[in-house]
Image (cartoon, rainbow, N blue to C red):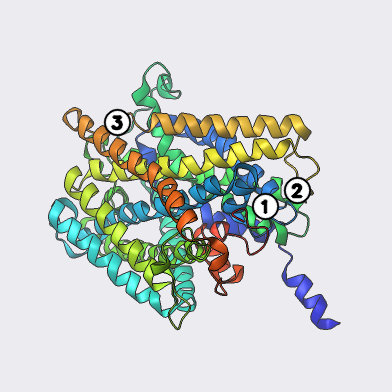
Amino acid sequence: MGKVSKKKVSKKLSLFGFFALMASMVLSVHEYPTFAVAGMQIPFFLLVVGLLWFLPVALCSAEMATVQGWEDGGIFAWVGKMLGARFGFAAIFFQWLQITICFVTIIYFMLGAVSYLIDIPAINNDPLIKCVCVLVIFWVISFIQLGGIKKTSGFARIGFILGVVVPSLLLVVFGVMYGIEGKPLVFNTEPTTLFPNFLQATTLVVFVSFIFANLGAEASASQINEMANPKRDYPLAILLLVILSTILNAIGGFTVDAVVPLNELSMSSGMVQTFEGLVLSFGGGLTWVVRIICILLILGVLGEIGSWVVGPSRALYTTAERGLLPKSLLGLNKNGVPTRIIIAQGVIVSIWTVVLTLAGGGNNLSFLTAISLTAIIYLVSYLLLFIAYMRLIKHPEQQRGFHVPGGKAGKIIFSVCGLGSSLFALIIAFFPPVVIASDQTLTYEIMLSISFAAALALPFIIYEVYSKKQPQKQIKPARIQAKDVRWFSRISGRGEHLLPPEKDDPSG
């Protein structure tokens, strides 16, 4: 009797527990330099994205996650049940593919800290050296992860605390001290710049960076079934998170904008520039403090990359079991890691690295192209998610444990807002950001368009080939359970929502 009650208690997630979990998923220091581009418009974009995009994603995903039989299905089941297996596979494939690009942007961020730490600017500035460094770092981390998820999860948690939480707190502390001391501020404080000029498309391009900061918001939906009182606590937790993330992201973006001039800001090493400007303003002998902060940032990135290498690849492995990927990708090592998929993933990351780093020159152009490409690929998944949710609205007979507030009208409003903001962000991403030089805009547009077209076609080509060549029922599933991936979503905001279902598989 005692064992049963203990099990029940362990599954209950309090409001505070869920809020802390979601905060670890959403909050990050990586995006502060891109936020800074918006200047005094930062609060506007944060609020608009929070209300018109983050809330709809979180609420609609939560309702789909509690549909009877879909609890562990993730977006593969949500989209597959409503739109068919082809689109369900495309949705999960896009979620995995965007991560292969995101690896590049995260390592760019890390190299900015490494370059400062060892005082070798070429690591961050020379395209060829930068490309080699990205490849070496990624492949070393990938091979380390073959040891299994237990080793990965512990290091990832430490990386999150030391590499995200601590630097964020230090940024606030040094920023307040900087302001109190009356140090020079470089941002534009004119009140007329509080709202963007909607007649200029280039001023809205930054909207994509704010969307990018909240990608993976649907990961919270996988935890709603573990909450003690989801109908009351989930909407409250999400609203509180929107408020907190808006405040912290605004502080982070304003701090970068106040310390580093826009024409000198590097998207990949902007945080190092900011800490250098803040700390050294109190004395040139404090360089050692900046170096310690760089070490913390590096630890955070290493932990984040390590968790991302294994989690999504394990989720994608289940689609290979169902015959939607080549049989050659099947196979686990003694630690339960899908080695062949990780190697294939590494090859794709390597291709993105070479294309984005060498073609883009390795600096802001490469970084911003990679961010935009990551965002628009993931946004296609969200478009499919909202379209599937709109179809779910027409099926009230489907039993579910959570409903979007506001009845049917609320469901329609939130889904339309989410679909509209996702489509708007996808379109606006193709406009070159203001920090890209005018002679590089054409390169940006060509790189982004060609890469997106290839990425968009890939899952549908794969599905057409392998859904016919390899009937899924002939593939015997290996035992990869939801709990094997659940740790991943808890530490990085991604993972469990990628896990296709063991039952009620939309692919048949």
The numbered dot on residue 65 is: 1
Q: Residue at x 39, y 43 (%)?
A: 457
Give the percent coordinates (x, y) of residue 119.
16, 61
Image quarter in which the N terminus is found = bottom right
Q: Nearer the viewer, residue 416 or 321?
A: 321
Give the percent coordinates (x, y) of residue 364.
24, 42
Q: Residues within 10 Å of mark 3 (few under 14, many from 20)?
A: many
Look at mark 3 in the image and give the residue it sits on: 432
Tell me if 468 is positioned left or right of 406 in this view.
Answer: left
Image height of 247 relative to 434, above or below: below
Q: Residue at x 72, y 68 (%)?
A: 11
Q: Residues within 10 Å of mark 2 (few under 14, many from 20)?
A: many
Q: Which comes before the other along the chain, label 2 or label 1?
A: 1
C-alpha span from label 2 to label 1: 9 Å
Kindly identify the amino acid type of the residue bearing the numbered disc 2.
Answer: Phe
Q: Which comes before the other along the chain, label 1 or label 3?
A: 1
Give the percent coordinates (x, y) of residue 301.
37, 62
Q: Residue at x 35, y 76 (%)?
A: 144
C-alpha span from label 3 to label 2: 40 Å
Rendering quarter of residue 188: top left
C-alpha span from label 1 to label 3: 36 Å
Image height of 238 relative to 197, above or below: below
Kindly identify the amino acid type of the residue bearing the numbered disc 1.
Answer: Ala
Q: Nearer the viewer, residue 314 or 83?
A: 83
Describe the element under mark 1 as helix, strand or loop.
helix
Tell me if 157 is positioned left or right of 137 in this view.
Answer: right
- Disc 2 and disc 1 in contact, CB within 8 angstroms: yes
